[in-house]
Image (cartoon, rainbow, N blue to C red):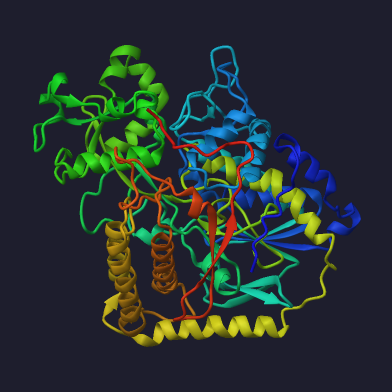
């Protein structure tokens, strides 16, 4: 299959505006006849549901949570980018576009990224109108700070709660539509299969997580807004409920999975403390604005930080990358931390940590200013570690955080299944091989507020509203498959818990498919993951029954999917014989240890097609072209 991103041509700066003029519309009186199904109510889902309902469509929104306010979007702390140039430091739409393409190591689609940069300014206006309490300067204008990978200040923030405040804005807008009856909200529903009829997405099968009943939802279009698959690593910064099931089941129905090997390892997380930890905690990248990263110069130096004098400290990011220093992009900072720890310069009890030190900032700005900027983050760190970061440096280490890969979509955000649209982190479209800080929130709300409200009507205008009921054979087949899978999980009654298998998978993923990879390790990983899959389906123990509130059953289905996601991730990493962004193949690095791309052979998006259980997936390639940002060796020195 020849993949077509359907990007408009012509001058980059006007592509989106010209494209919008060509899109078909649905007349206001006809919009109420269309049913739109939104899966997931984080930032992308809630903003899409609210906006489409405001336009007049009827929307049904499903969430696995007891309230959309608990979506993982609340965990995005540091800020959201926008090309407003409030600091007058020479920022622009083009510079945000360029920084994002370069940050993604020239593996993103230019047209999508430019559109993202264009609508970024609208996002801030929308959020302010909703009452999002962005930080302000003394004179009342919105404040900005900088993030990794850029040399301007374009990040808008609400202390360390930016995601939470943006989510409250989107959630409030959606709930207003719930009040009018234009949005039907279904909580504690998990999508377990996509229904495809006559080649189009026409609904889903969901499980009521309280009663265990299977439910059928019919729609004219399905919007998947379910986030990423970072929990495939077991330990990650993702909430435990974040999962890949909706996307993975859609993949098995024909949606292609793109660039699954592009998984971001975030450099500033609280280090792992023990083997039985369930997740890791992210410390915002904004801390690197004022915090300085260092390790002891001498390998094996185990003295406390306060006993290591200044001349015996190595501020390795400032030394290696003087141009960006502590604000290098996340992939660069993560690999640098691993390099130092591998050289026995890591700190703390495990030696898998580096210091993030605010002593200089407190001396320069005063503790009150630092507290005002990062106080809630410092409080959170102290509650978890029992260490006061105002007195001793924080300890940080990289952890699985975000997935740039996801379901393949075209310029309209439509997958390879007509009628299935994928928004936010669930798709692959905007970040390339590495995501710059403060860009996740930007894409989520851009897709929901400013892209899908234009592109979805174009699709619906070419479809007859309704005409499908849940007795269609496609619903019968999908529900039958879901029921069979649930009963199989419960029938095995083996000796191994779901948690043990997930933990085993995570160790393989972290050690062999994590920050750096090589062909030998990836080949071993694929074989070991297949062994875990065999153990899962022959020896897993899932207690309880299907007709009740059963968390073990929920997690069993998700871990079964993680195992398959992990294998595809490793396959994709093995096939990509280059280093780019967050995908670092040890065989392909420059003399000074940086990622070495192979533009001649790998300047494409890898899109994988499911060919059946036990059958190797098929690789399709979407060639990438760069009209505006000519690829160069990425350097932050």
* Image vertical order of residue 212 relative to residue 349, above or below: below
* Image vertical order of residue 484 relative to residue 574, above or below: below
Residue closest to the eye, 507 or 497: 507
Identity of the residue drawn at 32% across and 64% down: 522
* Quadrant of residue 574 within the rendered picture: bottom left
Q: Is 344 positioned to the left or the right of 551 in the image?
A: left
The quadrant of the picture occupied by the N terminus is bottom right
Q: Position of residue 476 (x, y in %)?
A: 65, 85
Identity of the residue drawn at 64% across and 45% down: 112
* Quadrant of residue 261 within the rendered picture: bottom left
Q: Judge whether residue 126 can be spotted in this image.
A: no
* Image vertical order of residue 401 relative to residue 606, above or below: above
Q: Is 93 positioned to the left or the right of 79 in the image?
A: right
Q: Position of residue 40 (x, y in %)?
A: 58, 58
Q: Position of residue 315 (x, y in %)?
A: 24, 26
The quadrant of the picture occupied by the C terminus is top left
Identity of the residue drawn at 50% across and 57% down: 259
Question: Seen from this angle, which residue lies furthest front?
Answer: 600
Q: Is 597 positioned to the left or the right of 42 in the image?
A: left
Q: Position of residue 290 (x, y in %)?
A: 36, 23
Q: Is 518 positioned to the left or the right of 84 in the image?
A: left
* Image vertical order of residue 122 relative to residue 399, above or below: above
Residue closest to the eye, 545 or 20: 20
Q: Judge whether residue 289 can be spotted in this image.
A: yes
């Amino acid at each position: 299959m020849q993949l077509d991103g359907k990007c408009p041509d012509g001058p980059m700066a006007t592509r989106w505006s010209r494209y919008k003029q060509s899109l078909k519309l649905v007349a206001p009186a006809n919009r109420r006849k269309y049913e739109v199904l939104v899966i997931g109510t984080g930032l992308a889902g809630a903003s899409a549901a609210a906006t489409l309902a405001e336009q007049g469509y009827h929307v049904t929104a499903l969430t696995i949570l007891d309230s959309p306010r608990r979506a993982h979007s609340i965990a995005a702390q540091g800020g959201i980018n926008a090309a407003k140039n409030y600091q007058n430091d020479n920022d622009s739409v083009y510079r945000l576009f360029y920084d994002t393409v370069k940050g993604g190591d020239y593996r993103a689609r230019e047209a999508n990224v430019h559109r993202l940069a264009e609508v970024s300014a609208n996002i801030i206006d929308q959020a302010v109108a909703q009452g999002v309490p962005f930080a302000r300067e003394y004179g009342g204008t919105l404040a900005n700070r900088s993030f990794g990978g850029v040399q301007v200040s374009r990040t808008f923030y609400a202390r360390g709660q930016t995601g939470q405040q943006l989510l409250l804005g989107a959630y409030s807008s959606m709930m207003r539509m719930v009040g009018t009856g234009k949005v039907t909200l279904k909580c504690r529903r998990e999508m377990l299969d996509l229904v495809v009829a006559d080649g189009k997405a026409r609904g889903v099968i969901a499980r009521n997580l309280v009663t265990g009943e299977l439910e059928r939802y019919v729609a004219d279009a399905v919007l998947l807004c379910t986030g990423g698959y970072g929990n495939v690593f077991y330990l990650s910064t993702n909430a435990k409920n974040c999962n890949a099931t909706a996307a993975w089941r859609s993949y098995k129905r024909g949606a292609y999975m793109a660039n699954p090997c592009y998984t971001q390892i975030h450099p500033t997380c609280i280090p792992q403390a023990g083997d039985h930890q369930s997740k890791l905690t992210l410390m915002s990248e904004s801390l690197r604005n004022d915090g300085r990263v260092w390790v002891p110069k001498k390998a094996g130096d185990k003295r406390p930080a306060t006993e290591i004098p200044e001349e015996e400290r190595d501020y390795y990011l400032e030394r290696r990358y003087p141009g960006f220093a502590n604000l290098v992009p996340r992939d660069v900072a993560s690999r640098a931390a691993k390099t130092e720890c591998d050289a026995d310069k890591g700190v703390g009890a495990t030696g898998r940590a580096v210091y993030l030190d605010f002593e200089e900032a407190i001396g320069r700005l005063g503790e009150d200013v630092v507290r005002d900027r990062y106080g809630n983050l410092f409080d959170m760190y102290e509650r978890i570690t029992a260490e006061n970061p105002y007195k001793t440096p924080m300890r940080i280490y990289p952890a699985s955080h975000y997935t740039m890969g996801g379901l393949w979509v075209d310029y309209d955000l439509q997958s390879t299944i007509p009628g299935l649209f994928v928004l936010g982190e669930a798709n692959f479209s905007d970040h390339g091989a590495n995501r710059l800080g403060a860009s996740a929130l930007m894409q989520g709300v851009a897709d929901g507020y400013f892209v899908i409200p234009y592109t979805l009507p174009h699709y619906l205008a070419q479809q007859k509203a309704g005409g499908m009921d849940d007795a269609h054979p496609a619903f019968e087949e999908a529900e039958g498959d879901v029921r069979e899978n649930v009963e199989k999980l419960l029938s095995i009654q083996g000796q191994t818990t779901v948690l043990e298998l997930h933990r085993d998978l995570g160790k393989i993923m972290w050690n062999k498919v994590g920050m750096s990879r090589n062909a030998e390790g990836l080949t071993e990983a694929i074989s070991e993951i297949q062994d875990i899959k065999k153990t899962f389906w022959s020896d897993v123990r899932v207690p309880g029954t299907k007709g009740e509130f059963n968390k073990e059953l929920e997690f069993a289905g998700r871990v079964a999917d993680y195992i398959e996601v992990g294998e595809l991730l490793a396959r994709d990493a093995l096939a990509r014989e280059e280093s780019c962004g967050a995908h670092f193949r040890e065989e392909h690095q420059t003399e000074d240890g940086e990622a070495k791309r192979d533009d001649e052979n790998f300047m494409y998006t890898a899109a994988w097609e499911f060919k059946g259980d036990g059958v190797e997936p098929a690789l399709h390639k979407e060639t990438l072209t760069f009209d505006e940002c000519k690829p160069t060796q990425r350097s932050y020195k």
